[in-house]
Image (spheres, helix red, strand yellow):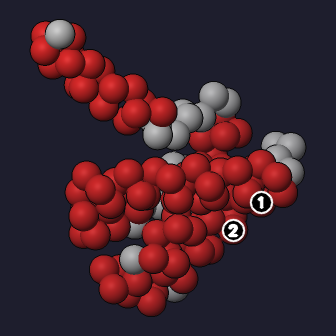
């Protein structure tokens, strides 16, 4: 009986953690939306690490990414779903890496975005 319990608890923990995993993007459009949402989330929640200029640039990057995604056929519901995925991912990173590690991962421009020169 004790041997069964010894294996049951780790198995239950693994199953519980796997249920909390956010889904990975399946299409290039979802990946693009997720990059924009992570940039927007980082701009909103990591100002103390990047500063106001970085937050403005990340918001501009997120807006440009959303505009590109809308041209590819994204809807408002798609953008909202990507914002939820970005929030879930940031919460997981917060648990694993803390504030600084999470913000280091969020304060990045989406792939293919080049900020305008001032």
Q: Position of residue 21 (x, y in %)?
A: 46, 37
**Quarter holding residue 49:** bottom left
Give 87 or 6, whichever is nearer the viewer.
6
The answer to whether residue 70 is visible is no
Q: Are marks 2 and 1 in contact (CB under 8 Å)?
A: yes
- In the rendering, which numbered label is found on residue 102? none
Q: Which residue is found at the position 35% from the left and 80% from the top?
A: 50
Q: Which residue is found at the position 65% from the left and 34% from the top?
A: 28
Q: Position of residue 73 (x, y in %)?
A: 86, 43
Q: Where is residue 99 in the image (x, y as percent from the top left)?
A: 28, 69
Quadrant of the snapshot with the N terminus: top left
**Quarter holding residue 18:** top left
The answer to whether residue 50 is visible is yes
Q: Position of residue 62 (x, y in %)?
A: 62, 65
**In the depicted structure, whether residue 85 falls above or below residue 114:** above
Q: Mark 2 points at which residue?
A: 63
Q: What element carries label 2?
A: helix
Horizontal arrangement in the rendering, residue 9 relative to residue 41 (left or right):
left
Horizontal arrangement in the rendering, residue 106 relative to residue 7 (left or right):
right
Q: Name the residue under label 1.
A: 67
Mark 1: few/some/many CA within 10 Å (<14, 14-19, 20+): some
Mark 2: few/some/many CA within 10 Å (<14, 14-19, 20+): some
Q: Which residue is found at the position 26% from the left and 19% from the top?
A: 8
How far apart are labels 2 and 1 at the CA level?
6 Å
Q: Is mark 1 on a helix, strand or loop?
A: helix
Give 34 or 97, whichever is nearer the viewer.
97
Count of numbered circles on the image = 2
Task: Single out the residue that lies furthest toward the bottom.
Answer: 52
Q: Which residue is found at the position 45% from the left and 76% from the top?
A: 45
Task: Single out the residue that lies furthest toward the front.
Answer: 1
């Amino acid at each position: 009986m004790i041997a069964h319990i010894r294996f049951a608890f780790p198995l239950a923990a693994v199953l519980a953690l796997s249920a909390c995993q956010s889904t990975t993007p399946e299409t290039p459009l979802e990946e693009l939306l997720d990059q924009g949402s992570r940039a927007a989330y980082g701009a909103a929640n990591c100002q103390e690490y990047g500063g106001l200029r970085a937050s403005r640039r990340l918001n501009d990057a997120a807006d440009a990414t959303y505009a590109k995604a809308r041209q590819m056929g994204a809807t408002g519901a798609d953008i909202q779903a990507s914002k939820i995925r970005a929030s879930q991912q940031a919460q997981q990173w917060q648990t694993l890496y803390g504030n600084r590690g999470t913000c280091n991962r969020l304060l990045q421009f989406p792939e293919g975005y080049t900020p305008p020169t001032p």
